Structure formats: C-alpha cells, structure tokens
Amino acid sequence: MFTHLMIGSNDLERARCFYDATFVALGGKPGEMDPRGRLIYAHEGGRLMITKPIDGKPATAANGGTVGIVASSREHVLAWHRAGTEHGGAAIESPPAERPNGSFVAYLRDPDGNKLTVRTQPAK
C-alpha cells in the first residue's frame, strides 16, 4: 500500500548520524543523500526518507504519529534501540520487551522528536 514514509528534520547531519546507526543495527545500509537533499534509507522493500520541510518552516514531530519498522529478530530490536540511544535518540515508553502477542518491541524518539518503534513479527 505505501511506497515510502517521509519525516522532517531540522538538522540532516544529526539525523543521518542517528538513522545510519539504527539502520545498520537492523542489517541495513547507511542512507544516501539524493539530488534534492533528502536522506533515503531502503531496506527489505521499504523506504524511509528524511528531509527538511519544503515550506521552509521548522520540522515538528507528529503528535500521535509513530513510524513502525519490522525487525527480523529480538537481537536486531535490541541493537536498534542501543544504536539509537547512543546516537542522539531518546528511549520512551517501556524498555524493550515482549508483548502478549509474542512480538518483541522497542520505542525511541529520534533527535527531532519523531516517534519510532521497531518490532519483530508476532509469534504464530
């Protein structure tokens, strides 16, 4: 259904430090800057793009919005969470934990305040 997710940043170099670390922790690659000045992260068929707002106003985090990313293992979730907190992100909600449906979940805010979650697929 979705082709990509785009979120705003007020400091692309700070965002790059955070997102490069967290995507590598998930087994992905560092982002690439496209000709329009957007950071692009492609992993397992999905794309996350980070940009300064085109209207010139400051980027703000979506109130109630969360970007969810799937991880292949509990270890990847933990590595993502650790990499994020070591590169400018803030741990939020509960510590990484298993949910009643069997998925393993962690939450962070990126350096611009965007809420992110990484989780394994629920147990079948």
Image (cartoon, rainbow, N blue to C red):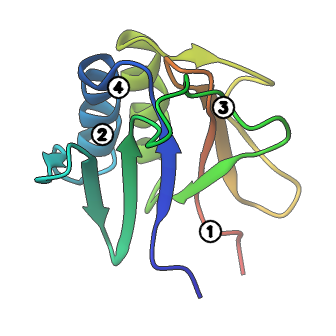
Q: Position of residue 20 (x, y in %)?
A: 24, 35
Residue ID for mark 4:
15
Between marks 4 and 3, how big is the CA–CA gap? 22 Å
Q: Nearer the viewer, mark 4 or mark 2?
A: 4
Between marks 1 and 2, how big is the CA–CA gap? 17 Å
| Residues at marks 1 and 2 touching, judged by CB atoms closer than 8 Å | no
The disc at residue 96 is 3
Q: Nearer the viewer, residue 75 or 119?
A: 119
Who comes first in sequence, dot 4 or dot 3? 4
Q: Is residue 51 left or right of residue 53?
A: left
| Residues at marks 4 and 2 touching, judged by CB atoms closer than 8 Å | no
Between marks 4 and 2, how big is the CA–CA gap? 15 Å
Q: Position of residue 82 (x, y in %)?
A: 43, 22
* Amino acid type, label 3: Pro
Q: State the quadrant of the N terminus.
A: bottom right
Q: Nearer the viewer, mark 4 or mark 3?
A: 4
Q: Nearer the viewer, mark 3 or mark 2?
A: 2
Q: Nearer the viewer, residue 120 or 23?
A: 23
Q: Position of residue 119 (x, y in %)?
A: 61, 53
The disc at residue 121 is 1
